[in-house]
Amino acid sequence: MPQYSIRGGVHPLDDLHSGKKATNGSPIQAFIPETVQIPMSLFLGKPSVPCVKAGDHVDLGQVIGEADGFMSLPTHASVSGEVLSVEPQMLMAAAPVVTVTIKNDFKDTWVRRKPLGQSVDGVDPAAIIPAIQAAGICGAGGATFPTHVKLTIPEGKTCDSIIVNGAECETHVTADHRTMVEQPARVVEGLRLAMRALGVQHGIIGIEDNKKDAIAAMQEAIRGQEGLHVMPLFTKYPQGGEKQLIYAITGYEVPSKGLPIDIGVVVLNVGTTVAIAEAVLEGTPFISRVTTVTGCVQTPKNLRVRIGASIAEAIAACGGYGEQPGKVIMGGCMTGFCVPHDGMPIMKGNNAIVALTQKESKAYEETNCIRCGRCVQVCPVGLNPYKLKYICDRGDLKAAEENDVMECVVCGCCSYICPARRQLTSSFKITKDAIMLEARRAK
């Protein structure tokens, strides 16, 4: 199968092994928090409707928020214990989100659904997608798009291949890397279940070549299984972007304003495939995930974290801060979000917590564009960031849309490479958000 490189791209922190050296050899450790705060909007779509109240006792895996339509998911308790509150809280969204807070009794009294079968081949294909929705599974790579929606193929479209995204090109993040090394069979089972649900014969696992142990583990896991392939990829950011990964593996481009299914492809994250296998073969809902905790902490680790655990507790499980951080980021340093405080809960899409030192988090002052063109060279979707920046900064939404700002994947390559320290990516994100808000208001 041919191997292509993506257009543009950068190698952030290349001299520091992309910030991954501290955790890429660290085995996954279980972490159980004292309290969890579980928002009803853990996924992209209509929030769950809470079905518990303060004072209730809940079991691990119990539904605490019911799905509200097709573009919604149920939400499950990630610990057993007492519900302390059900109330709006200000988290990372623009408005308060209804959040269920549970005090852990550390008994882990389970409520599991009945597994659909003990092996992939013994599962009824028609039952797989409903089980995925019932388990509350969404994209674990950050976008948190409901997986059952992604696997529901629109009329007139066909899926020829499913790609598992094992690129993990972001700085500092090693959660998927360790998952592939330690649970390769589970990754393959989740992929095969998705293939079985859609009647697809081709499954491809794309892994950047800086993860040689993960490549070897996955190649061994697919040995003798027809239709499955492991594709080693050249290491380059942002190859883990959905459209960039598809091009790197297949050589085909997703059309402008189109979706992967328009060219017959569905992409799933490594963590998502594991969640699928656990839901279908064990009856376990999506109540925990692997999260890398690194940066200026005493002992950087890869933790299997219960959803809703606070960042502060996860950092304490790593020995606490090594020094006072300047910023704490959910995700990697290229696309992650700075949190207002470390009491924020870890969500289904949070693959990393990175604590940056005061020096590392120092903000640089913007200077004038020198027209060097580096931002154009590294843009993975072929935009003109320097031109788009002027349009966005003057608030001209129509012109920004005409100049394809909605095609921006907010990868941060342009800001990273800019010698004038222009805050390009943030301008584009603000403008994209404003355009989408206007579109919603116009409906």
Image (cartoon, rainbow, N blue to C red):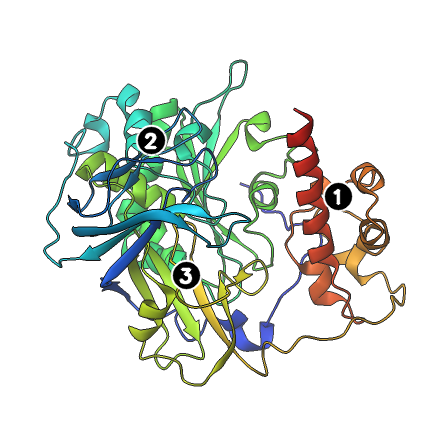
Which callout, 2 or 1, points at the residue further toward the start of the chain? 2
Identified by mark 3, the residue type is Met
Identified by mark 2, the residue type is Gln
Which callout, 2 or 3, points at the residue further toward the start of the chain? 2
Q: Residue placed farthest to the top in the image?
A: 156
- SS class of the residue under badge 2? helix
- Which of the two discs, 2 and 3, sits closer to the camera? 3
- SS class of the residue under badge 3? loop
Which residue is denoted by mark 1 in the rendering?
405
Label 2 vs label 3: CA separation?
A: 26 Å
Q: Position of residue 441 (x, y in %)?
A: 66, 30
Whether residue 306 is visible: no
Q: How many marks?
A: 3
Which residue is denoted by mark 2 in the rendering?
133
Label 1 vs label 3: CA separation?
A: 31 Å
Whether residue 36 is visible: yes
Q: Position of residue 1 (x, y in %)?
A: 53, 40
Residue visible at 67% across and 75% down? Answer: 363
Residue 370's image quarter? bottom right
Asked if residue 284 lies left or right of residue 290, the reply is left
- SS class of the residue under badge 1? helix
Figure check: 18 above or below 349: below
Which callout, 1 or 3, points at the residue further toward the start of the chain? 3
- How crowded is the residue under tag 2: few (<14 C-alpha within 10 Å), some, or many (20+)? many
Asked if residue 285 lies left or right of residue 92, the reply is left
Figure check: 389 above or below 301: above
Q: Quadrant of the C terminus?
A: top right
- Residue closest to the eye, 274 or 337: 337
- Residue closest to the eye, 263 or 79: 79
Residue 249's image quarter? top right
Label 2 vs label 1: CA separation?
A: 32 Å
Residue visible at 65% across and 50% down? Answer: 6
